[in-house]
Image (tube, grey):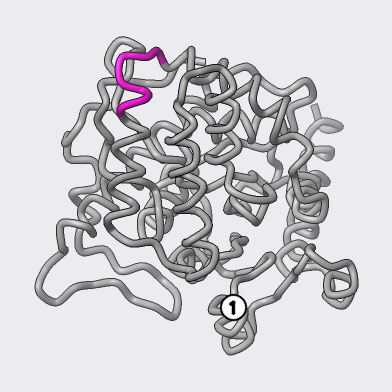
Amino acid sequence: MPARSLPNGSGFGSGLAGMILPGRRQFRNPLGPSEAEVRANVAGEASADAALALHEAGPETEEPQVPLDLTAAAFFDVDNTMVQGASIIHFARGLAARKYLKSADLLDFAWKQIKFRVTGKESSVDVASGREKALSFVAGRSTAELARLGEEIYDEVIADKIWAGTRALAQMHLDAGQQVWLVTATPVELAQVIAKRLGLTGALGTVAESEDGVFTGRLVGDILHGLGKAHAVRALAVREGLNLKRCTAYSDSHNDVPMLSLVGTAVAINPDTDLRELAKNRGWEIRDFRTGRKAAKIGVPTALLLGAAGGALAAAVARRREHAV
């Protein structure tokens, strides 16, 4: 599954530097965009480009579902939203078992994830350290090799860690004729593996630069995180002709508030303390699959009901056209 080569520092997202995202929160900096904001813009644009390139070039699922509701989509965070735990840790475990990573690197990844889950925050030092380790691993390796390893590790480790409730929500969007995308800081090639295995449309993830199918060891922009996810969703929406007011986003983390605020319907899945409080204040729906009792109290997200109606209408129009031919 080769990824398209994306040049480092090529200017992706430069036109988005002063962009205002719709929703309750605005992100314009009166002093101009910071370096971090520019990198987030670049990462988002690159992620959207790479996601569509992988979607078009990769093999289809066995029974691909063709979207009928062309202006609505759902965006799912991965870690602790679609997958129990951190996907990058699961992949790292598989890589360590294959001697691609040292045990010390795996422990370092795990420790940073524990700190993040306890505090709900990631330090710039931890993010930079994790980025350097990940880039040093992929440098000089082929994109095809990473995708192959991702498929093996998914089947061995991750397949049994998918939240059944979240997977069911994604399927409901698919059944309503909508696109369904994963949005994650995990490398886009690995995120695409998860999306493909689940029969989803595709994945937005962190883009590592590659030349002639070989990773250079540099990122395009930055890790897809926080504001970067919102830019990636916005960029994909422009390319796919999506109406963000008709779209839905799902996440467990307060760090994803920019993405959740971007769409018409936000749903907190297994939320951390800060996101749960914010969701209550903003009237966002909450689903907690960590206990069946909590999950049972919450109904079907509003966007699914609207999406199902839109999908049914589109299907009816399509059938009429078929009969008219």
Task: Return the x and y of residue 98 as percentages of the image width and height.
Answer: 56, 17
Left/right placement of residue 60 relative to residue 30 reads right
Q: From this viewpoint, which residue is outermost toward the left? A: 31
In magenta stretch: residue 209: no
Task: Return the x and y of residue 217 as percentages of the image width and height.
Answer: 27, 26
Q: From this viewpoint, which residue is outermost toward the front? A: 104
Q: Compared with residue 259, is residue 2 higher up or lower down, i.e. above or below?
A: above
Asked where in the image residue 53 lies, by quadrant, the reply is top left
Q: Compared with residue 105, is residue 2 higher up or lower down, i.e. above or below?
A: above
> What's the residue at 51%, 18% (across, down)?
99
Which residue is under mark 1? 273
Task: Return the x and y of residue 133 as percentages of the image width and height.
Answer: 34, 35
In magenta stretch: residue 141: yes
> What's the residue at 46%, 40% (across, down)?
205
The residues colored magenta run 136-142
**Front-lying residue, 158 or 284:** 158
